[in-house]
């Protein structure tokens, strides 16, 4: 007999140790107790085995993580709708595609957008301090209702200028001067504030190379002066800084045209003089997404043809 079974049999017969000794003298009582203990062990083992079998059937060997709750994406009538619920693997793939950046169109590339001079201070604050009292209200209203230019800069050349002969020369002139150089500094002054219903800008005059920064820029003072003198008059006479725009799609050509209009007919454009506003800035390249040159040429040629067709149609209507 096993000692564990005997001990349980003794405890089952009597809780008192003294009486357990007396019961040992009765063999029949001891045999009955031993059989009872064996039956109890067998029942207990059967119940434990049944519980283990049930657990093994219900629980997988590897616990899978709970499936995340994400919004469902459903397409109906060409529109995409997002609804709450559980998302399967295919829908998760759709969400990943939504998050990825759109590929660049084949007609675009990354390149130099323009060459500009960046002021070392926020000229909007400088101009605001120099404005007369009667113009302060207009200035604050335009700043609140319009789009403030992200970076105030003096644009010397834009990549679209390469389509024209004289613009291409200015582009090459800036490219040859700024290649492999540290920032080159210039002085300038703001003479007038000019605006219409779309733009508020400051007219720039007196552009000069800063000879004191020549050594840091790795350029000779003579080369800086030659660069400024080499800029054509049609560029220097229309230099400006856009301060506020009524629309994000205002082009540099539109602002340059406003400056020319103001110089040709000052009374036709709103303007006020600015008293001795001096500025300083460095020249740099602006990189970004630009149209490819061949595509841009074809696009401009197509627009010229459309313009000619409209003019011919107007003439035909007038001759009837």
Image (cartoon, rainbow, N blue to C red):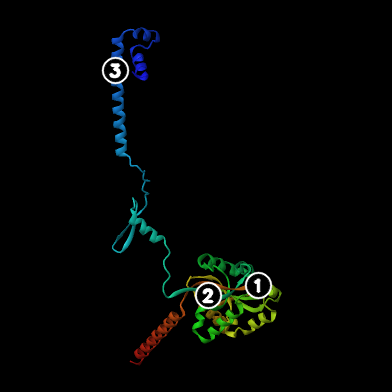
User: Observer-nearest residue: 40 or 279?
Assistant: 40
Spot occupied by residue 251 in the image (x, y as percentages of width and height): 50, 76
Q: Name the residue nearer the viewer: 109 or 30.
A: 30
Eye-nearest disc, 3 or 2:
3
Residue depicted at x 32% and y 33%: 52
Task: Specify which label sits upstream in the sequence, 3 or 2.
Answer: 3
Secondary structure state at the residue bearing disc 3: helix
**What residue is disc 1 on?**
280
Instruction: Name the residue: 51% across, 81% down.
Output: 161
Residue 157, by quadrant, is: bottom right
Name the residue: 52% across, 87% down. 165
Where's residue 223, x and y in %? 66, 81
Mark 3 surroundings: few (<14), some (14-19) or many (≥20) residues within 10 A: some
Mark 3 and 1 residues: CB-CB less than 8 Å, in contact? Answer: no
190, 91: nearer the viewer: 91
Figure quadrant of residue 13: top left
| Disc 2 packing (10 Å; few <14; some 14–19; many ≥20) | some
Element on which disc 2 rests: strand
Q: Which residue is mark 2?
A: 112
Q: Is residue 145 above or below residue 56?
A: below
Which residue is identified by label 3?
36
The answer to which of 312 and 222 lies nearer the viewer is 222
Query: Which secondary structure, mark 1?
Result: strand
The residue located at (35%, 11%) in the rendering is 14
Q: Quadrant of residue 244?
A: bottom right
Do we see residue 136 in this rendering?
yes
Q: Is residue 221 left or right of residue 37?
A: right
**Mark in front: 2 vs 1:** 2
- Badge 1 crowding class, 10 Å Cα cut-off, few under 14, some 14 to 19, many 20 or more, is some
Q: What separation in Å lies between label 3 and label 2 (alpha carbons)? A: 96 Å
Is 216 positioned to the left or the right of 235 in the image?
A: right
> Is there any visible trace of residue 197 in the rendered image?
no
């Amino acid at each position: 007999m096993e000692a564990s079974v005997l001990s349980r049999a003794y405890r089952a017969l009597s809780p008192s140790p003294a009486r357990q000794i007396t019961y040992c003298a009765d063999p029949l009582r001891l045999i009955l107790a031993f059989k009872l203990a064996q039956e109890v062990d067998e029942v207990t083992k059967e119940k434990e085995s049944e519980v283990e079998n049930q657990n093994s059937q219900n629980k997988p060997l590897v616990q899978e993580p709970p499936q995340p709750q994400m919004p469902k994406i459903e397409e109906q009538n060409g529109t995409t709708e997002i609804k709450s619920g559980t998302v399967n693997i295919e829908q998760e793939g759709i969400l990943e595609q939504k998050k990825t950046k759109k590929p660049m169109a084949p007609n675009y590339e990354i390149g130099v957008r323009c060459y500009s001079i960046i002021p070392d201070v926020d000229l909007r604050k400088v101009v605001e301090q120099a404005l007369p009292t009667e113009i302060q209200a207009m200035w604050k209203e335009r700043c609140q209702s319009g789009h403030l230019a992200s970076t105030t800069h003096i644009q010397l050349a834009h990549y679209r200028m390469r389509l024209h002969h004289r613009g291409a020369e200015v582009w090459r002139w800036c490219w040859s001067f700024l290649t492999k150089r540290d920032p080159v500094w210039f002085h300038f002054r703001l003479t007038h504030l000019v605006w219409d219903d779309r733009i508020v800008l400051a007219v720039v005059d007196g552009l000069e190379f800063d000879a004191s920064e020549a050594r840091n820029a790795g350029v000779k003072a003579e080369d800086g002066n030659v660069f400024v003198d080499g800029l054509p008059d049609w560029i220097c006479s229309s230099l400006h800084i856009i301060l506020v725009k009524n629309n994000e799609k205002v082009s540099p050509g539109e602002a340059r045209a406003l400056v020319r209009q103001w110089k040709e007919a000052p009374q036709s454009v709103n303007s006020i003089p600015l008293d001795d506003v001096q500025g300083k800035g460095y020249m740099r390249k602006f990189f970004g997404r630009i149209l490819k040159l061949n595509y841009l040429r074809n696009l401009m040629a197509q627009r010229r043809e459309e313009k000619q067709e409209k003019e011919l149609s107007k003439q035909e209507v007038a001759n009837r």
